Amino acid sequence: MDPKKDELIELGNNSEVLLSNPTFILTTNQLIEATFSNFVNTKADETQKRESSYYHHRALMDIVATLQQRVAVRDQMLNETETEE
């Protein structure tokens, strides 16, 4: 296999380990819930606080989505490798 594919597979493996780690799951869920709560509980005139909470929430969601994407890429590469053989 080529080194780039090996690297992507390793990223996928590491991402899956992180996504299945109970502490990671608990921490990210708590942070996502807290930032969402902060967002929806801001007053109409607290634009900066609401925007800050929104961007924090989006950042957390992007981290999880990136890890999930790495796992999906790994799975696709492994399936392609099996198909080639």
Image (tube, rainbow, N blue to C red):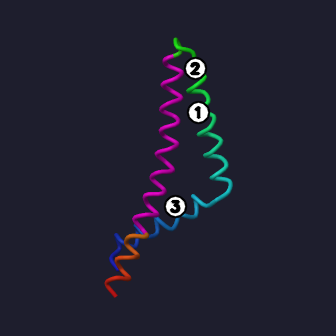
Q: Main secondary structure of the magenta part?
A: helix
Residue 15's mark? 3
Start-end of magenta stretch: 47-74
Q: CA distance from mark 1 to mark 2?
A: 11 Å
Amino acid type assigned to the residue bearing label 3 in the image:
Ser
Q: Residue at x 43, y 63 (%)?
A: 72
Which of the marked residues, 1 or 2, is nearer the chain's N terminus?
1
Q: Are marks 3 and 2 in contact (CB under 8 Å)?
A: no
Q: Secondary structure at mark 1?
A: helix
Amino acid type assigned to the residue bearing label 1 in the image:
Thr
Residue 42's mark? 2
Q: CA distance from mark 3 to mark 2?
A: 34 Å
Q: Quadrant of the C terminus?
A: bottom left
Is 23 displayed left or right of 15 in the figure? right
The answer to whether residue 49 is magenta is yes
**Which x, y percent locates residue 25?**
63, 52
**Which x, y percent locates residue 19?**
57, 58
Front label number (3 vs 1) = 1
Q: Residue at x 59, y 40 (%)?
A: 32
- How many numbered circles are shown? 3
The answer to whether residue 52 is magenta is yes
Q: Secondary structure at mark 3?
A: helix
The residue where tag 1 is placed is: 35
Amino acid type assigned to the residue bearing label 2 in the image:
Thr
Q: Residue at x 49, y 19 (%)?
A: 48
Which of the marked residues, 3 or 1, is nearer the chain's N terminus?
3
Above or below, comparing residue 2 to residue 8 in the picture: below
**Which x, y percent locates residue 62?**
46, 45
Q: Secondary structure at mark 2?
A: loop
Is 3 displayed left or right of 35 in the figure? left
Q: Quadrant of the N terminus?
A: bottom left
Above or below, comparing residue 29 to residue 46 in the picture: below
